[in-house]
C-alpha cells in the first residue's frame, strides 16, 4: 500500500484545512487509519484514529472538538478536517494504516506540512 497525504499549507490561526490521504495498491477497507503529527525535535504523536468501518473514532485531547477524521471507502481515502487551527497545531502530519489484527502501523504515508501563523 502506498499512502499519499496532501492538503497541508499555511493558514492563519482560527482557519481550517482538510488533509487527505489516498491509498494506491490495495484497498483500505481492512485497515484502521490514523493521523499522526510531528514537530521537529519532538516525538510523533497520535492525532486521530478511525476504525475500519468508520463507526468509531479516537482523538487526542488537544484536537478534540476541532478536528474530524472521516473516510470514504469508494475513494480509498481518509480525511482530517481541521478547524479552529492554533499555532501549536503546526507540524508535519502523517497518515498511517493499521491492518485489522495488527499491533503496529503497517504503512506510513509521507508527511504534509501544516503551518499555522498567529
Image (cartoon, helix red, strand yellow):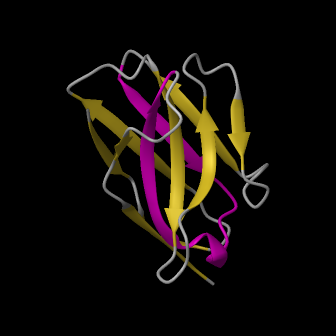
> On the rendered structure, is 88 left or right of 92?
right
> Does residue 80 show up magenta in the picture?
yes
In the figure, 64 relative to 40: above or below?
above
> On the rendered structure, is 50 left or right of 41?
right
Residue drawn 51% across the image and 76% down it = 39
> Does residue 107 show up magenta in the picture?
no
Residue drawn 26% across the image and 32% down it = 1
In the figure, 41 relative to 7: above or below?
below
Whole-percent x, y for residue 93 in the image: 46, 59
> On the rendered structure, is 65 left or right of 7?
right
Residue drawn 49% across the image and 40% down it = 104
* Quadrant into which the C terminus falls: bottom right
> On the rendered structure, is 67 left or right of 61?
left
In the figure, 12 relative to 3: above or below?
below
Q: Quadrant of residue 75?
A: top left
Q: Quadrant of residue 89?
A: bottom right
- How many numbered markers are drawn? 0
Residue drawn 55% across the image and 78% down it = 42
Whole-percent x, y for residue 34 in the image: 53, 42
Q: Quadrant of residue 56?
A: top right
Whole-percent x, y for residue 63 in the image: 72, 56
Instruction: Please tell me which residue lies in front, 47 or 17.
Output: 47
Residue interval drawn in magenta: 75-100
Whole-percent x, y for residue 88 in the image: 65, 76
Instruction: Please tell me which residue lies in front, 82 or 59.
Output: 59
Amino acid at each position: 500500500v502506498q499512502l499519499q497525504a496532501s492538503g497541508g499549507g499555511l493558514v492563519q490561526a482560527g482557519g481550517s484545512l482538510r488533509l487527505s490521504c489516498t491509498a494506491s495498491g490495495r484497498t483500505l477497507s481492512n485497515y484502521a487509519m490514523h493521523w499522526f503529527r510531528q514537530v521537529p525535535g519532538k516525538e510523533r504523536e497520535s492525532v486521530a484514529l478511525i476504525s475500519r468501518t468508520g463507526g468509531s473514532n479516537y482523538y487526542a485531547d488537544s484536537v478534540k472538538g476541532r478536528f474530524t477524521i472521516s473516510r470514504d471507502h469508494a475513494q480509498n481515502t481518509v480525511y482530517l478536517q481541521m478547524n479552529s487551527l492554533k499555532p501549536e497545531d503546526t507540524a508535519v502530519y502523517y497518515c498511517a494504516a493499521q491492518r485489522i489484527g495488527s499491533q503496529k502501523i503497517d504503512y506510513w504515508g509521507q508527511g504534509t506540512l501544516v503551518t499555522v501563523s498567529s
